[in-house]
Amino acid sequence: MGATDFRLTSRGVSVREAFQDAVEAAEFENGHDSYNGTISTTEYYGDLTDKFKKSGKSINSFIDEFLESCSKYHCYSICIESPEIDKGKIKSKVEHIVSPGTKKWILKYVVHCLREDRVVGSFLTKGCAVDKARKFTEETRLPTSIEMTKVLEKGNTTVARVSYKGKDKLGKWMFFGMASI
């Protein structure tokens, strides 16, 4: 199999986050094929910002020269805009959710499909859960598990929401390397 070079920019609070976002975007656009010629077929090997700055070359000249000796499946980056992380002491907001009344918890038997990571059903007795699990497994040939779980009989189980309120400025990185085709 061959290789092709690529160059793209991506933003994030860190180079790892920016790389992951670029990979996810490439997979969304081009699928999960391991020979799609995008950043998604590579591994991140490191930041070359200092080396680039010391070179005195234009970014394109530096990348062109570097790619001549770059190994397949390798991805590198150059920081174009540094991220600025909010240095405030408290960067999150808590919204408390109060629901009046007494809470009553009940025991349920929950049937999970193991391969599809989904709930098949929830039952008040173990016997009903076993019956449903057996029926589902025999029809689909997929394994199941049954777990005991306490659930709130009425009302909402959410007691608080925590959200980020920091004022981070995302960094911008140029990613380049040799992708598999």
Image (cartoon, grey):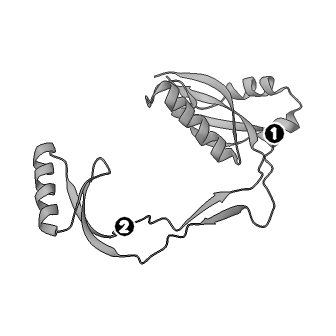
Q: Nearer the viewer, residue 65 or 60?
A: 60
Q: x%, y% of residue 68?
A: 68, 24
Q: As shown in the figure, which amino acid type bears the numbered disc 1?
A: Glu
Quadrant of res 155? bottom left
Per the image, the residue denoted by label 1 is: 81
Checking the image for residue 154, the label placed there is: 2
Q: Nearer the viewer, residue 48 or 164?
A: 164
Instruction: Specify the farthest residue to the right.
Output: 56
Quadrant of res 34? top left
Q: In this rendering, would 130 be left or right of 117?
A: left
Q: Secondary structure at mark 2?
A: loop
Instruction: Specify the farthest residue to the bottom.
Output: 102
Whether residue 84 appears in this view of the structure is yes
Residue at 20% in and 67% down: 124
Residue at 52% in and 68% down: 159
Circle nearer the N terminus (1, 2): 1
Q: Residues within 10 Å of mark 1 (few under 14, many from 20)?
A: few
Residue at 79% in and 67% down: 89
Quadrant including the N terminus: top left
CA–CA distance in space, label 1 to label 2: 50 Å
Residue at 11% in and 66% down: 127
Q: Secondary structure at mark 1?
A: strand
